[in-house]
Structures are given as C-alpha cells and as structure tokens.
Image (cartoon, rainbow, N blue to C red):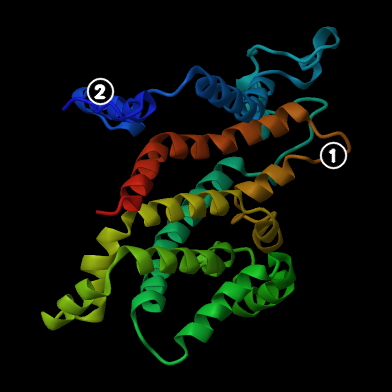
Amino acid sequence: MTATIDEAPEAQAPKNKRNKAALLGRSPQDTPAGAFNYILLGFILLVGAWPIYWAGIMSTWKEDKLFQAGAPQATPGPYFQFNWDIMTVKIREQGYPAYDNVQFVQSFFNSVIVVAVVVTATLFFCSLAGFAFAKLKFKGRDPLFYFVVLTLTIPAQLGIVGAYQIMDTLGWVDTLLAVTVPALVSAFGVFYMRQFIEDAIPDEIIESARVDGATTFRVFWEIVVPTVRPAMGVLGLITAVNAWNEYQWALVAVGGSDAQTIGPALHNLRVGNTPKNSIVLTGSFLASLPLIALLAVAGRQIVRGIMEGAVKT
C-alpha cells in the first residue's frame, strides 16, 4: 500500500520499523539495545561484582601478605587452601585464633536444609493463603487480609524476645526448628501471591471447575498452581536469599551451637582482638557462592516467567 500525499514521513517511520521487524521474524521490542544501554549495564555489573571479586582475591592470601608494598593485592594468591584449613581447624598456625566454634562446613549444610524446607513451605502455604484471600468468600476475609498486610509494618526486631521465649518453652532453642518453623510462611508472600492470583485467574474458570465437581483443593492444585508458577519462582528466589542471609534471629536462636547456620558461623569467624581479614573474607566468599549459582541457574528462567505471566492474551 502506498502512502497518501497528506501522510507525513514521520508517521511512516514507525510502520516501516514494524514491517522490517516483522520481516526479520521479531517484534519491535526485540530490536537490539543501543551502545549506551550496554555500557550502563556493564558499569552496574562491575559495581555489583566488585565486592565478591575483592572477597575472592583476599581469600587467596595470608593475613601478612594482604597489603604487601603498601597496596592491596589485585590478583589471586596461593593461600586459599591455607585459609580453608585454618578456618575448618584442620591445621593451627601461630598468630591465628582457634575457630573450633565456627563449624563452617556443618553450618553450610544446616543452611541448605533450612533454605530447602523454608522455600518449599513458603511456596505452598503462601500460594494457598493467597488463593483463599483472592478467590474464596468467607466471613472476615478482608479484615483478616488487612491484618496480614499490617504485620508488614512491624519491625522484626520487636518480636525477637517473644519469639525466643516461645522457642525456649517448646525446647527448640539451639535446634534447626528454631530457625525453620517461624519462617514457614511470610506476610509478604501471602500478599504477593494474593495480588497475582487476583489478576491472573478469572473467576469463571474456578466456577467452571466447581460445576464439574472439583473440590477446592483440586482447583488450587490443578488450576491455580500451574498458572502462578512465574510468581512462585520469584517468591521462591526471594525467600531462598532471605533464608540464606538470615543473621539476627539465627544468631539469637542457634548461634554457637551445632545447629548454627551460615550467618552465625561468619560472625564467629571474627574472634580475637584482631580478627583475621583473610579468614573472614574466605568464609564470606564461600557463603556467597550458592546465591551466585542460584541466580545464574534460575535468574533467566524467573525473568522469562515474569514476562510470560505479564502478557495478557
């Protein structure tokens, strides 16, 4: 179709761009980003990766060699195994304090167990509660939901004393139950899943399933869960990061015991009057690797799931 005389060249440009993108088999949104975008993203990547790089470099040097010639080391050294052996009490060295109470390896696996249980429980309970608040009608639903949202405004520090008393009464102090059970469900997760389910699942689909004789739980399991997988992926990633990085409550509930997680273990690396930075950074670098691997493996899939869930057909 030819352009009319009254049609301005500026009006033809977007059409030509869309036609060119269609011929190339992609949408206009798929066109390559400009050089400025890549430069900006590269700068952000460098800024974000620098602390991890620094910790990795420092973990490969001994304490007395970190600042040779008055400047920090910028390349890897040969002492990572030495720092690992000191931290895990495989060897003892004069000038280095004893790290018998750190139990880094056991703390690492304790955190893996806690994260696995907390993420699984949070995804199930939060999506179930979100489904109830979004699609089920029961007395007091709205006031109860508002109460759940209101709890997000209360600082977690205010509940530490009460939570510790409850754990002590139950006999759970210095056990993994103390850091696992309180985190099995979160107010943010309930709110997030409720908002996603409210918009993603039409009421007509649920009513049709009920007409066919499906129970409430079957509707949740076979209709709601497959639909909200993108939101569950995002919530699972956020929950895993928070559970792995938990420090304050873990230090109070299990710090110094055999059930300590990675947070208290890193805290216990700073022993003595002059903590050894090489040892502290070795533990910090190793503790950050699981989160880096998680983001590397699941990051793209989660972002893709968000975009798919955001497209309305």
Residue 91 lies, in percent from the top left, at: 67, 28
Query: Disc 1 on helix, strand or loop?
Result: loop
Q: Residue furthest top?
A: 69
SS class, disc 2: helix
| Residue sticking out furthest to the right | 273
Residue 71 or 143: which is nearer the viewer? 143
Q: What residue sits 79% from the left and 35% below the top?
A: 97
The C terminus lies in quadrant? bottom left
Mark positioned earlier in the residue sequence (2 or 1): 2
Crowding around mark 2 (Cα neighbors within 10 Å: few <14, some 14 to 19, many 20+) is some
Q: Which quarter of the picture shows residue 254? A: bottom right
Where residue 265 appears, x then y in whole percent?
66, 46
Identity of the amino acid at label 1? Gly
Provide the residue designation for mark 2.
20
Q: Report if residue 85 is visible in the image.
A: no
Q: Badge 1 is on which residue? A: 272
Q: Position of residue 25 (x, y in %)?
A: 20, 27
Viewer-nearest of discs 2 and 1: 2
The three-letter amino acid code for the residue at tag 2 is Lys
Indicate left or right for 198 with 15 as reference. Answer: right
Task: Name the mark on residue 14.
Answer: none
Q: From this viewpoint, is residue 245 visible?
A: yes
